[in-house]
Image (spheres, rainbow, N blue to C red):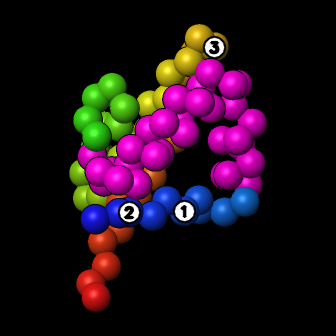
Amino acid sequence: MDYQLQFYNAKVQSAIEAWPAGISASFIRIAEQMVSSGPNLGMPYTRPFGNGLFEIRAKGAEGIGRAFFAALWGGG
């Protein structure tokens, strides 16, 4: 089953796209894996906080980028 990744709004997307190249590349790899495998990849990539709230932990040579996201499951 493939999942979808959507940003909360354009401001959030722009902020993440402005991350340094190494962190951005890590985020892209994590996001691609989430689309194919789901949001709970586990440490060091994602960390669950409960009730569908997770944190992405994208690491690069420049440091680490962290972003929160919600995993929503719909019926259908």
Camera sees residue 71: yes
Q: Position of residue 15 (x, y in %)?
A: 71, 43
Residue corresponding to mark 2: 3
Mark 1 lies on a secondary structure that is: loop
Residue drawn at point x = 35 percent, y = 68 percent: 72
**Mark 2 vs mark 1, CA separation in Å:** 10 Å
Residue corresponding to mark 3: 62
Disc 3 residue type (three-letter): Glu
The residues colored magenta run 11-40
Tally of numbered discs: 3
Determine if the magenta segment contains residue 27. yes
Q: Position of residue 71 (x, y in %)?
A: 36, 60
Q: Position of residue 20 (x, y in %)?
A: 70, 25
Camera sees residue 65: no
Residue drawn at point x = 31 percent, y = 79 percent: 74
Residue 18, compared with residue 23, is above or below; it is below
Residue corresponding to mark 1: 6
